[in-house]
Amino acid sequence: MKARSLILLLIISFVWALSSPSSAAAQTPITFGAPSHDIDFPDYMTFEIAASSSAGQIVSAQLVYWVPSEVSLSTSLTREDLEFSPSSSVHLSFFMDTEGLTSFPSTPYQYYFIVEDSAGNTAHSPEYSIRYDDTRYDWDVFENDDVAVWTHNRPNSFGQSVFEIANRALAAQYPLFQVEITYQIRIIIYNNSVEFAEWHAVRTNAVGGEASPGIGVTTQIVSLGGLNQLWLNDVIPHEISHLYFAQAASNPKVAIPNWLNEGVATYNEFTDNSGRLLEVERLGQQGELTPLSSLDQGFGRLVDEDRFRIAYSESLSAVTYMVETYGEEGLANLLSIYKSGIGGDEAFLTAFGVDMTEFELGWAAWLGIPEGMYIIPTAWPMPTFRPSPTPYIIGAAPASTPAPSGPDAEPSPTPSSATDPEREDSDTVTGFFSAMLFVGGFTCLSFLLLIFVLWWLNRRRSKA
């Protein structure tokens, strides 16, 4: 009996030794030191580590990094070959140049190194994490497990006020979304538009803030003026709504109407928006609304600033109708259907029993628009873009209901000047006018060709 127990113990010990990570790690001659970083936001960040091999010289190395997403299971890995002089001990470094790009503050990065030596041994370092924080300021942080508010050069009472509004918004919005935000939201407050603009590739004074649901971060401009409380009661719940919305509905296979996301965010603001709802009702009865189907992809700021503002109010009105007709549970059900991978008319039919056109006509009837006055669809004559989740300001918190502007920001996994799929830039306008010039030129050539053919036919007829 004792011999059998001893044999069983030896087998268990052998299996454990084979599966033990420390045992496997001890077999490689390549070792790594502790990682280090140098951050100079928004211009650059470095990834550094020491590596050595007892079996030969280290001859090649790579850095593999990615931005983990809070709302998507897919990640995009970037591999960078590292330059160094072969040696048994090397210092590995990668310089990430972000100067002139839009680099969202507090973007999280995960990474590891791969090293190979001259004896053919290959080793992976452990995975490390770092955030590309804004290092320009000394930040005061107010936080719990759900929210972290970052402020600088402001009284503690200000940061505490933002913190309280954020926690109140989280609690108030849960019944609408019926999901838990599974990460700590980070809210970064800038004191003026200059601080905010310095980390953007395209700078403008017309943006009050941005949300990045993928990394769970929002940024806002809150000036040193005296209207902050009114502004904060709009912008903080609005931004948190975008993060909630992404958690509840985001699916890379599904296109969700932009008016729905913006309408829900405006619906969740603490400010009384009854005046905006009355304005939409009046405009609808006068036949001056833009159909929701034309706001699926954007709000068309390039067409008319006032129409851009009204688009937010229309979206708010449509969501208000949705909640009054189908209840908050109906909206939560629609978002969960999007999350499951169902979009378009099928999502509305599953949630409400009507397709998107029928829903839109129901909303028009709810507004009191006479039948036949509301036409679907009306296309924008110029390119649209995804609007900002925050209202429009110029360097200060507004005194009255502001008009929204700016693009939703979703940072790219790697610094790049390429257009992110969640944003559009000025190239849209350039492309539009290039297309118009091409179409115009083609039309003129076709017209000249037609005149020549008619002249030639007439000349042949005359000879005959």
Image (cartoon, rainbow, N blue to C red):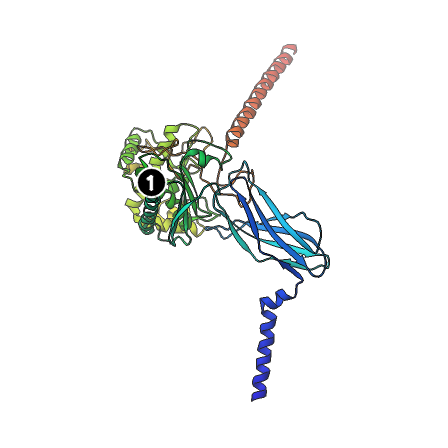
Q: Which residue position holds label 1?
A: 232
Q: Nearer the viewer, residue 324 or 32?
A: 32
Q: Is residue 92 left or right of 303 when viewed as pictured?
A: right
In the displayed structure, would residue 17 be above or below residue 367?
A: below
Q: Horizontal and vertical percent for residue 445? A: 59, 20
Helix, strand or loop for disc 1: helix
Residue 233 picture quarter: top left
Q: Is residue 346 left or right of 417 when viewed as pictured?
A: left
Q: Amino acid at mark 1?
A: Leu
Q: Nearer the viewer, residue 341 or 79?
A: 79
Q: Horizontal and vertical percent for residue 45? A: 55, 44
Q: Residues within 10 Å of mark 1 (few under 14, many from 20)?
A: many
Tell me if residue 318 can be seen: no
Residue 458 picture quarter: top right
In the displayed structure, would residue 426 be above or below residue 136?
A: above
Q: Nearer the viewer, residue 273 or 354?
A: 273
Tell me if residue 444 can be seen: yes
Instruction: Name the residue located 33 percent from the left edge and 29 percent from the top edge.
Output: 288
User: How many marks overall?
Assistant: 1
Instruction: Name the residue located 66 percent from the left edge and 63 percent from the top edge.
Output: 28
Q: Horizontal and vertical percent for residue 53? A: 68, 59
Q: Horizontal and vertical percent for residue 203? A: 48, 32
